[in-house]
Image: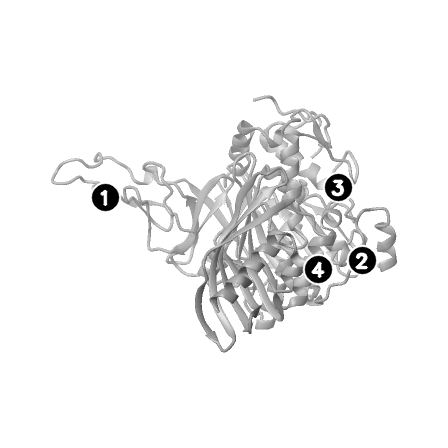
Amino acid sequence: MRPVQFPREDYSRIPFWLHHDEELYGQEMERIFRGPTWSYLCLEAEMPNPGDFRTTWLGDTPVIVSRDKDGAVHAFVNRCSHRGAMIERRVRGNADRHVCLYHRWCYSHQGELTGLPFRKGLKGQGGMPDDFDMKAVSPMKISVQSLNGVLFGTFQPEKAEPLEHYLGEFGTGMVKRFFAKPVKILGYSRQKIHGNWKLYAENLRDTYHASLLHEFFVTYGVDRATQKGGVKMDARHRHNMNHAYTASDSQEEAKKAYADTAAHLDRMQLRDKKLLQFKNEYPDGMNLAAPTFFPNALLIQINNTIGTRQIRPKGVDAHEVFQTLFCYADDDEAMVRHRLVSANLVGPAGLVSMEDGEAIEVIQTSTRSAPDAHAVIEMGGRGAIKDLTHRVTETPIRGFWSYWAELMGVEAPGGVR
Amino acid sequence: MRDVLTALMAEYALLIDEDRLEEWVELFDEGCDYRVVTRENVEQGLPNVLIWCDNKNMLRDRVESYRNVNLYNLHYDRHVLGPLRILGHDGPLWRFDVSYSLFQTTLEGESRLFSVGRYSVEARIAGETAWLEKVTVIADTGLIPSLLATPI
């Protein structure tokens, strides 16, 4: 593989080949997803009872998250120790134990190999050697930690920072904000985007595009760059949050700002305005918040639709975006209905999100033939990476690459952090 | 009745395939309900929706947004519908299921299977004509390829 070299130490130039190289993709799975990072796995609310499990992905590794009979949550690689078959093929369920279909090897809720057929042979013949150690071959464990019911996992608990330190002050605070009270799952959506997973990670750190690509935001006044809002990052600039406050700008101000863009304000009015109704339910008053966590997740609030999104890399040129929407356990029927109506805005068919899939796919398609060319990331400034009280920026993309480069061992000489 | 309802669904599919979405909306009654859900959610008893318009104005809004605001993959649609499975009726209100396949073709002519699933429909019949009261698209294809814009 060619060496990774960033042309500029502030990561304002990103070579296109980094989205197209199979070998590099393999290294990312190893050094980032199976490295000293915390990845989002799922929510405790998806597995409330003893024996409940759900399968998920940590990078490209299949994972079982399971609750034991004492209520503790465990995670382990969903791969049989014997011949490597996927142990649990269901998406979710309740099980006393997990049994591999191939030779019926059995695993506990904790991920320990607890038994295998014909271990002592039949009628004195066959069987495993007497000294076969089931414990020694049990599947690889993933350290799992819950923050207000949000489950994060790491393969390297000894090297990773403590979870709350890793997420940083704002990240931890935002998890606690979204999950201040018990939640109930409303359901899932899945989308397969034919582009490298890092293009989605970049997209989440690019607030510049939000009101331009997603014109619905501006046309119907859901979100405009002129509203009060900004970009927050953790100290290492690997996580970020785009956020905004509703009705914090004036119509005149917004009209002037968008006058020279292709996006038009006020051309149209919705016939049914309930789609954009916002009932403030947080002390901070934000109507839009998207705290994003390196490497694979974000929490999303658009008006009263709230959820989590997980990036599941599917090879060098594809990824799945897995979204879980939830409500609060004490919501009444009308509020649940309101959240579901707002769900029209997000997800694969979302009126303010559908464009992301298309933007990423056209980058993947057109950069394939330009490995040596690079993206230009200067909106919001060059040099040091800093928080901003506006959103005309893509600086958090540089933060992402800076941390990516550190984990991959390819930091630019004198690279900013 | 089968002929009237079959003709209604043939019209439904062709109006989408010919990108006549404004006319497609006109097949619905004012108090209609159109939603796209996935089989994964339905089987778990989860109410999540990918698209939900609980009246005709919301459908009009969505189509207007597609025409003027949203940017999505440029493509042709082609629906292939199975026979109707009529479930029963309550006076003029008929309930039936129809299986569908929906293929998408790029402007350069490359086709792919985009979605497969079932419509669960309630339609009101008056003489030779029929209106859609409720269409629930239950997509087996829960993993949406690229994105979902034009209706199923």
On the rendered structure, is A253 left or right of A334?
right
Quadrant position of residue A181: bottom right
In this orientation, which residue lies closer to the viewer: A270 or A285? Answer: A270
On the rendered structure, is B150 left or right of B102?
right
The numbered mark at residue A267 is 2
Quadrant position of residue A134: top left
Q: Amino acid at mark 3?
A: Lys
Determine which residue is flagged by label 4.
Answer: A287
Determine which residue is flagged by label 3.
Answer: A386
Q: Are marks 4 and 1 in contact (CB under 8 Å)?
A: no
Mark 3, residues whose alpha carbon is within 10 Å: few (<14), some, or many (≥20)? some
Gap between marks 4 and 3 measured at Cα: 23 Å
Please state the chain letter of the residue tagged with numbered disc 3 in the rendered image.
Answer: A
First in residue order: circle 2 vs circle 1: 1
On the rendered structure, is A56 left or right of A361?
left
Mark 4, residues whose alpha carbon is within 10 Å: few (<14), some, or many (≥20)? many
Q: Are marks 2 and 4 in contact (CB under 8 Å)?
A: no
Residue drawn at point x = 38 percent, y = 42 percent? A86
Residue B8 image offset from top left, x and y in percent: 55, 63
